Image: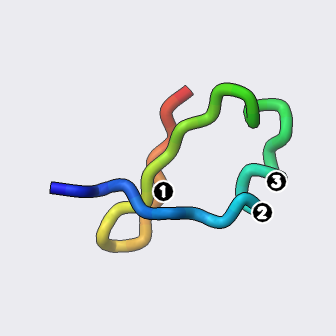
Amino acid sequence: MKKHTKVSVNYLELIPKHRSSLEFSIGEQGEVTLFQ
């Protein structure tokens, strides 16, 4: 059951302040879940 999808690094560049400790996953519907 692999829910995590490879995401472009460009996404992290949108929120550089969280870059060091940002985790997120994209669901099957395309929704993004952030873990802060």
Task: Give the residue drawn at x 49%, y 32%.
Answer: 35
Residue 30 higher or lower than 19, as above or below: below
Q: Amino acid at mark 2?
A: Asn
- Tell me, yes or no, whether the two marked residues, 2 and 3, touch with CB atoms within 8 Å: yes
Is 14 or 9 nearer to us in this picture?
Answer: 9
Label 3 sits on a secondary structure element that is loop
* Relative image position of residue 9 (x, y in whole percent): 72, 59
- Dot 1: element: strand
Residue type at mark 1 is Val
Q: Which residue is mark 1?
A: 32
Q: Quadrant of the N terminus?
A: bottom left
CA gap, disc 3 to disc 1?
Answer: 14 Å
The residue shown at (30%, 70%) is: 28
In the rendered structure, the answer to whether residue 33 lies left or right of residue 28 reads right
The residue where tag 3 is placed is 14
Residue corresponding to mark 2: 10
Q: Is residue 30 left or right of residue 15?
A: left
